[in-house]
Amino acid sequence: MPLITAPVITPPDTGGGGGTPIPLPEVGFAVATYTDPSGTVWPLTDEDAGWFTLADGVSGLGASSYGLTTDAHPRGGARLRYAQPQARAIVWPLYVYGETHVEFVGRWRALATAFTRTLRDGPGWLEIARPDGTRRRIAVYYQEGFEGRGSKGSGIVSDAAAITLWCEDPYWVDPVAVSVHRETGSLSSFFQPYPTVSSSQVLGATTLKNPGDVIVWPKWTVTGPASLITVTVTRTKIVNGAPVVTSESFTLDPTAVGHGNLLAGQKVTISTDPPSVRYQDGSNWVGALDWPSAVLWGLAPGDNAVTFQLNGSGPGSAVDLTFNARYETA
C-alpha cells in the first residue's frame, strides 16, 4: 500500500488554498488548517483533501474560561482578588473518507499520527483564517477522540472522529509579529547653523500600541553605543474611583557583567517571557539587570506610554521590540 501523506501547503492569506470558508461556531466564516510538529500543513475545511471538518460539532473557539480567586466581603458577597485564565479544550470533529478501504485507512492513519505526535514532538498549531486575510492560531496537543464512531458500516470507506485538543495557553496568537523600532535622532547642534528637528520615531517618550485583547510579553533588542539602558512604562489605573499613576521599569548596565559600555553595533536581547538576557555572542547577561527592582513588564492592550533612556547614546543607538498580539477568541 502506498504511503499517503498530507500535502504541504502554505496557510492561506485570503481564504484560498485551504478550502472554501465555512461557518464555524463562535467564529463565523473561516478556513481552518492544522500544522503538525514537523511543519506539515493539513487543510481542515477542504473536502477534496479526503477529510473535512464537521462544523456543527466544533467548540472551544470562544473566550477563555477563568478561575476566580475571591475574598468574602463582611457586608455580603465577595471581592475579586485574581483571575487566572484556564487551559483551553477545543473539540474538532473530522470526517475522513476514501474511494477504497485502503485509501481511507491511509488517510485515517496519517491524520491520527499528525495529531498524536504532538505528545512526543511538541505542540501543533490550529489556525483560523478569515476571508479578509487575517489569521489567528493556537498551540494544541492531542488529548483524545481519534477513535471513530464504532457504528455499523463505519470504518470501511469513511468514519468520523471528534478530536479534543488541549491548549496550555488559552489565547489565540496573530502569526504576524508586530515590530517597533526607535533610534537616536540626528545629533546636530541646535544653534549652528540653524535649529534642527529630528524624526518623531526616536528614543525618549513614545507610545507603543498592543492591538490584541490581552497583555503581551515583548522581546527587546538594544543596539549600542550605550552605557546604561532604562525602559519605563507608565500606567493609569482607577482605584476606588480615582486615577492612580504607576510605573514599572528595568535598567540594563553592561558594566555589571564586566563588559564595559556597549560599543556601536553591539547588541543585547532581553526576553520578558521567559525572562532572559543574552549578549550577541549568546552569553548570559541576566546579571546586567537592576535586580531586585527590575520588572520585565508586558504591554497591556491598547496604548502604552513608554520611555526609552539610553545614556551614552550616539549614531546607531536603537531599541527594537517584537511581539505577537494575543486574542481571547479565534
Image (cartoon, rainbow, N blue to C red):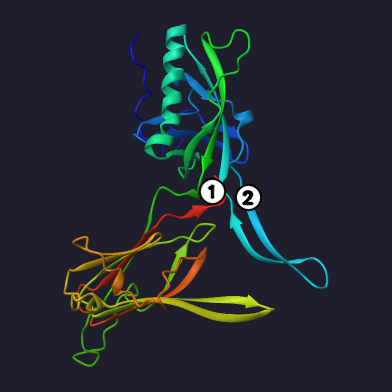
Helix, strand or loop for disc 2: loop
Give coordinates of residue 115: x percent, y percent: 45, 30
Q: Residue 71 falls in which quadrant of the image?
A: bottom right
Residue sitting at x 59%, y 75%? 237
Q: Seen from this angle, which residue lies furthest right?
A: 75
Left/right placement of residue 143 relative to residue 289 reads right
Give coordinates of residue 209: x percent, y percent: 46, 65
Can I make out residue 18 in this image?
no
Can I make out residue 77 in this image?
yes
- Which is nearer the eye, 25 or 239? 239
Give coordinates of residue 279: x percent, y percent: 23, 65
Residue carrying label 2: 65
Q: What amino acid type is highlighted by mark number 2?
A: Ser
In this rendering, the answer to whether 28 lies above or below 284 is above
Q: Seen from this angle, which residue lies furthest bottom?
A: 191
In this rendering, the answer to whether 82 lies above or below 231 is above
Are the residues flagged by discs 2 and 1 in contact, CB closer than 8 Å?
yes
Residue carrying label 1: 170
Q: What amino acid type is highlighted by mark number 1?
A: Pro
Measure the C-alpha gap from mark 2 to mark 1: 8 Å
Helix, strand or loop for disc 1: loop
* Sequence-first tag of 2 and 1: 2
- The quadrant of the rendering that contains the C terminus is top right
Left/right placement of residue 279 relative to residue 16 reads left
Q: Residue 207 falls in which quadrant of the image?
A: bottom left
